[in-house]
Amino acid sequence: MTLRNPVLPILLVDDEAAALKSFEFALNSLGWDHVLAIQDSREVLPLLKHREVEMLILDLTMPGVSGTEILECLSLDHPEIPVIVATGLNDVKMAVQCMKMGAADYLLKPVEKGRLEAAVNHVLEMRTLKRQNRLLKERLLMEPGLEHPEAFEAIVTRNPRMCAVFRYLEAVAASREPILITGATGTGKELLARSIHALGEGPFVAVNVAGLDDQMFSDTLFGHRRGAFTDAVQQRDGLVEQAGEGVLFLDEIGDLNPQSQVKLLRLIQEREYYPLGADVPRRSGARVVVATNTDLRRRMEKKEFRRDLYYRLSVHHVHLPPLTERREDIPLLAEAFIRMAAEEMGKPVPTVPPELETLLRTYHFPGNIRELRSMVIDAVGRHRSRVLSLEAFREAMARESGVDIVEADPQEDDGCIYASCRRIPTVREAESMLIKEAMRRAENNQSIAARLLGISRQTLNSKLKKFHSGE
């Protein structure tokens, strides 16, 4: 059996110097010389606060702090550190107790070299498996089974729903059918369209079709022949021709006018189109990717969007969640935007105060990622000191009212949130509940909680004192 060679040291804890020497010699002879030996058990817990170890080989009967006390503390504060108990106590009850407290093994002194080797190897194998499982989880979260993670590297996320979107897009990458991307404004629909393009070949051509009348739409996408209309002094290829075998991205597809919807349907169904003034159709190999922040089903019900076009466009459909449903991504995105803004402005990257993450997590971000990006750029542009100021963020949030509006059920007594309560709370009780909830969301940061409540920090502090004193 060959002892694995971990990076972190094995920590030996025994009040007998001879026992420490014996264990250290045995481990060295087995090929591992990265060993720490501690004779005073009182030094163990302070050491573990600032230093990582692979495992502990721990005696039980020691002056100062006993081995069982150390084992109990480790089970609470450092459960990730495996412990091998090595003791002269041949006591079944003690062995059971130690195993219940999390010990990985229980060895009796004097410990045979082969027994020590087997115990240490077993612990190291378990540690290796746990590390691999953790790395696998992280990979599944960040790049969950992706064959081409580089296609999505521009999208900063660790959100499981976003990762599921990536997996789906990889799965349908070989298809030439259209892809519909839905999501609120600022969720990154064009960025995702570029990731789809990165999974294939050819050019990426994008156009926002909102507000285009039918002739402008046709001319932009399909081009025209010379003389097709008054100003057509020369032939011009449209965006479909430019896209070739790549991706044609049509943003704000929900606002496409009815006449243009018919022409887009023909392009998708027949894979051909007519440039303005042409009698012979041209073939298209472009993959059509469309995006919208509108509810296309509702537009279909209103006869504003063709049903047949909707079903052709939504062969493959992905929906991007709003930033409020990706809160774990907020600090990652903020950090990325801060670095980007500092680099673009030629400034050193500012130190980010820890309160920023809490502040951002309390905000509802109606503009999603685009709004967060704008906030960060403004804050970095205005900052002058070493530490990034929170003032720019607070001002931006205040402009959007700063407080999430709770949408109550309109069928319940005009939407009153207390309509279903048997007894409505007193004003003092309601105020107390609001303050407690604001403090919870703000992670006990009074400045942020005060902003959520729409009061000053001084007023909040005064109310908290009254509540704590029982007045």
Image: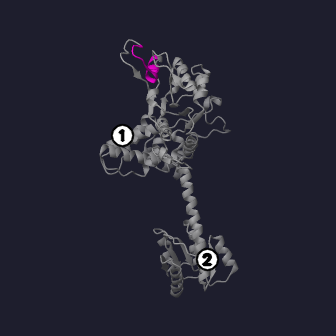
Image position, residue 173 (x, y; %): 55, 39
Seen at 55% across and 22% down, the residue is 266
| Mark before the other along the chain sequence, 1 or 2 | 2
* Snapshot quadrant of residue 82: bottom right
Image position, residue 385 (x, y; %): 30, 49
Q: Distance from label 1 to label 2 (Cα)?
A: 60 Å
Seen at 35% across and 15% down, the residue is 233
For disc 2, the neighbor class at 10 Å (few under 14, some 14 to 19, many from 20) is some
* Snapshot quadrant of residue 154: top left
For mark 1, what is the residue? 378
Residue furthest out toward the front:
280
Q: Disc 1 or disc 2, which is closer to the eye? A: 2
Q: Nearer the viewer, residue 94 or 391?
A: 94
Q: In the rendered structure, does residue 224 fall within the stretch colored magenta? A: yes
Q: Nearer the viewer, residue 166 or 431?
A: 166
* Residue extent of the magenta highlight: 215-228
Q: Amino acid at mark 2?
A: Ala
Q: Is residue 295 above or below residue 443?
A: above
Circle 1 sits in a helix, a strand or a loop, which is it?
helix
Q: How many marks?
A: 2
Is residue 454 toward the left or the right of residue 425 in the image?
left
Does residue 352 appear in the picture of this structure? yes
Disc 1 vs disc 2: Cβ atoms closer than 8 Å? no
For mark 2, what is the residue? 118
Q: Amino acid at mark 1?
A: Asp
Circle 2 sits in a helix, a strand or a loop, which is it?
helix
Image position, residue 172 (x, y; %): 58, 39
Which labelled disc corresponds to residue 318?
none
